[in-house]
Image (cartoon, rainbow, N blue to C red):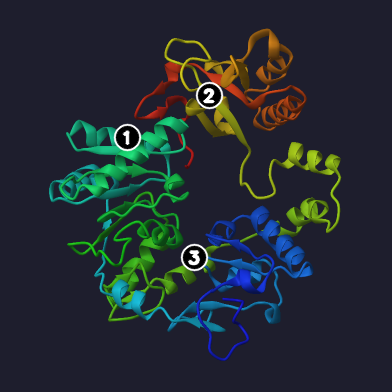
Amino acid sequence: MLAEAFKSNRHYASPLARIFTSALFLDEAYYMSGNPRAIASTALLARYARGARVPLILMSATIHESHIEWIKLKREEVVTACLEGDGIGGRCDVEIDGGEFIEKASAIEWKTHKIREENVVSSAEELVKAGRRVLIGMRSIARAVNIYRGLREKGVEARILHAGLTLGDRGRVLSEVETLLKSSDRAFALVATPVINAGVDASFDSLIVEAPDFTSIVQWSGRVCRDVDKPCEEPPEVFIVEHRSEEYVLKEVEKLSKINPKISWRIPFSFGGAEGYGRLIDADAEKTEIKGVGREAMKLFDLFYPFFVRQEKITKYLLSEGSPARRSLLVQAFIEGREGDADSGQILERMITLEAWEVEKCAKHVSVYIEVVEEAYDSEKRLGVRSGEDVKELWEDIRKNLESPGRLYRSLVIAHMRKGSRRGVVAGGILILKEVYREGEGLLCIQEGGEG
């Protein structure tokens, strides 16, 4: 893409490694668009990369001109690339020859509907009975679990995927979903939160989705008729859940349907009689108001010093802010084993990453702080668990902060940093009692409100 920016005959992002010693790609760059800290991090990263003469490439199916403006890059330093026939904000420097993709993707005849929340389960049941593989995208773990239970009660084959599952259960669900997708005669429903967007490659026939914006619909739709070389047997349907979607999304879809009922959720520009999703992404940009980027940039500035960053500055930032890119403070937790002991089974498979504020909901079910350690047994290394007196001092500090997200995060970071001086420690976190974890549904105590 950038390697051939100055040639008269340009091709796709080819062999950058032949030209540059390094290049930095940020895939799914839309993630930074709505958060001042993520925008500030990207802006400083762009400035640093420019100074080091390292190309920075932002990639996304839903990138908008405002993404470039938000990170305050000068126009002459930006090269925009898009599919032939598209234009980002009316301007595109490099057009990619995507004729074959456009031809196949435009053959997909999307049908877009609105659906009431109380009809989600019954509609999904009908779609599965008709032989469809249905993806149901929920913004809340609690609502995802309720939909999943409703489907199971009706005898519908269903799976659930969300951030409140252990790593082991997530892996098993993904493995089962992969098997179901490979079987052409196995219709089913997968209820998921946005965690599915983290590198899950799967293709469904229909989508039911809660839409905070159009960007989310496009991203979810990317998992419907995903392989354009193997098109869906029936036109894919997108159902937007009315009560749980933003009002401007519903109004814009209604307005567009009167002009052209055919909306393409795969191509950003109008083609083959269908309206591209690009104008809907424009509506997102108009509704997005970003404040505080400068303030976040000032906090981050010392971390982007070109030559040397003192450890003390990194530690200070991590303790006070958490992360240069994450939107919330994250902590590690483990679910107690079946027999009630900390080290039964594969401990790392029972690990969950939680947002710090969620721990308050589970505080009375947290029993201790543990460390996963690598130990040698007869010249063979195995994982074990250290708890009790070995980590008593750390646990006392963590225990009193379980209902204070900021202080809890800091106490766990301090424990994590201290583990570096103790040989063999590979992970650490709080241990949650098994009574609040249900296999197939996840961690019960966090399933009230919140998104994810």
Q: Position of residue 76 (x, y in %)?
A: 70, 82
Question: In this image, 8 relative to 211: left or right?
Answer: right
Look at 19% across and 38% down and name the residue there: 156
Residue type pointed to by label 2: Phe
Q: Which residue is mark 2?
A: 334
Q: Is residue 149 above or below residue 27?
A: above
Question: In this image, 417 relative to 61: left or right?
Answer: right
Q: CA distance from mark 3 to mark 1?
A: 29 Å
- Asked if the residue under mark 2 is in contact with the one under mark 1, i.e. CB atoms within 8 Å, the reply is no
- Asked if the residue under mark 1 is in contact with the one under mark 3, i.e. CB atoms within 8 Å, the reply is no
Q: Earlier in the sequence, mark 1 or mark 2?
A: 1
Q: Secondary structure at mark 2?
A: strand
Residue type pointed to by label 3: Asp
Q: Is residue 54 above or below residue 160?
A: below
Q: Which residue is mark 1?
A: 146
Q: Which residue is mark 3?
A: 284
Question: In this image, 355 relative to 283: left or right?
Answer: right
Q: Mark 2 or mark 3: which is in front? A: 2
